[in-house]
Amino acid sequence: MITVQDLHKTYGSRTVLSAVNLRFPSSQLTSLVGPNGAGKTTLLMMLARLLKPSRGDIRLDGSQVTGIPIDEYAKQVATLRQTPEFNLRLTVEELVAFGRFPYSRGRLTRHDHRVIDDALAFLSLTALRGAYLNELSGGQRQMAFLAMTIAQQTDYLLLDEPLNNLDIKHAVQIMQALRRLCDEQGRTVILVVHDINFAANYSDYIVAMKDGAVHCDGQVSDVITERRLSELYGLKFDIAHNERGYLCNYFKPSGNLE
Amino acid sequence: MTVKTRHTVWVAVVALALAFVFVRSGFDFEYVIPKRLERLATMVIGGICVAWSAITFQSLTGNRILTPAIMGYEAVYLLFQALLMLMLGTRSLMLLGEHGNAALSILLMLGYSWTLHRWLFRDDRDNVYFLLLVGLVLTMVITTFTQFVQLKMNPGEFSILMGYSQATFGNASATQLLYATLIVATICLAGLKSLPMLDVLLLGREQAISLGVDYRRCVQRQLLLIAALVAVSTSLLGPTAFMGIFVANTAYALAGTYRHQVTLPVGCAIAIALFILAQLLVEHLFNYKTTVGILVNLVCGAYFLSLMVRTRGTA
């Protein structure tokens, strides 16, 4: 379990995150939602140790993360940032093999190869294993990066806007894959997501952030309410809920925007 | 490309080396051949330094059009030579001797890089672009200062200084070579272990950290190795400036993989082969009327362009 206590981040006199206290439930999918500039990505980057908190504690299973060596941390927490545009000539399989670096330090064992095969199969990428990344579509490339993160075999996965720039089918595929990681493999997934409908339909737990603080957090049914979302985004929401899930409609608000 | 291509590069190196030592030597084992072996050793060490430092530097910065020259190491060397010449004149040649000058240059370049890294990496900064910016600005400032110093010299001193500012293989003595070999061998052995880590750095800072690389320490250590390699090569051959760009990019194209275990040796072989080829041409075809630097850039540039055209830019 990852817990966050009294977390602050300031740049000079500007505060981007203040007094955040959270518990991220294990083996569940948690979405961080909220408007731009709310501090979601900042929080995720601090969990990933890509950014140092100005104040406060992050604990992994009770122990402070700053006390864990970075190479050990990589065996417990894997992070996927928004995939960079890179011009490296790399095949999907070579990329996924990087996920084994924390264990093999570059010398792949038979076990590593099996894990790589499993990760590729898990995301149905086996047919693309020899393809070069720069020749893939954005959605396929995102899948390949996710496969690398899965091959890292960590209990925790942190993803920063994994649905960014994806078409709806790829977005659904990614969310289903993350869901299966929680349900079938018991992994804990924490992601930043902008599409409130994906968050509502695929998460177990939602953390809503606004202006550098936690606006509200809880089970999906507690957070996905018309009142809470209206407060969060400053938009009017109509929420339909049936057995297939939630539909949050905010596309044509009546009246003027604030 | 394949393992075969990589072997071909090494075969070419050996063939060129043999040609360099024996062609028109008259098999004179008293003077001509020992002198040529010295130059050959300079080229081998220099080639390793140039290729290794350029490829590593490009991986750290995630940029294929840079060499460590942008950090100003060579500019510091040239400023040092210019100041020596200005203050002591041609007497400085006698006063320091060949070894004194080389040793002082190496120490100065290492001192410069150490200070620079200390300052750049103070309190948690690990922004490589900032590092490049500072390096570039310092290079320009130091170079301008060197030019200013040059204006105060007489033509004789100036022509000696020009000798320092171009890469040549004939200046290093046997003792100097021995020390250089020891330093380079130590650096390369130390560097070998971290080659897979360099591969991971190609994915960028954030992905590297997420895969368990201690980014700051890794970058600092690699920059130190690069500074030492550049210091050795500069003191042996003089500034090589941007030769590393051609060497590195040709190596990537021939190796056909991102892995440093492959690209670094191929790069070293290419650099050595190029140096020998250029030196052969300078000695036998152009009769010392052109410089190695010009030839290397010419040959490399042409070859690299042809590679880009043939592979339609995927190289």
Image (cartoon, coloured by chain):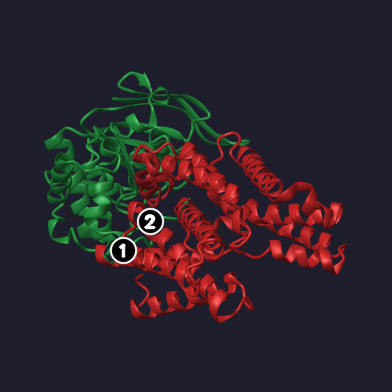
Disc 2, SS? helix
Relative to residue B104, is residue B46 drawn left or right? left
Residue at 82% across / 57% down in the picture? Answer: B90
Q: Which of the chains bears the disc numbered 1?
A: B
Of the pair B233 and B255, the residue shown nearer to us? B233
Q: Position of residue A123 (x, y in %)?
A: 16, 51
Q: Which of the chains bears the disc numbered 2?
A: B
Judge if badges 1 and 2 mark residues of a common chain.
yes
Q: Are marks 1 and 2 in contact (CB under 8 Å)?
A: yes
- Shown in green, the chain is A
How much space separates mark 1 and mark 2, taking CA atoms? 9 Å
Q: Position of residue A173 (x, y in %)?
A: 18, 53
Q: Residue B223, relative to residue B67: is it above or below?
A: above
**Residue B71 seen in the figure:** no
- What amino acid is at disc 2? Pro
Relative to residue A85, is residue B159 drawn left or right? right
The quarter of the image holding the C terminus of chain B is bottom left
Query: What is the drawing colour of chain B?
Result: red
Q: Residue B60, relative to residue A7: is it above or below?
A: below
Of the pair A138 and B299, the residue shown nearer to us? B299
Residue B308: quadrant of the picture: bottom left
Give the residue pinned by disc 2. B265
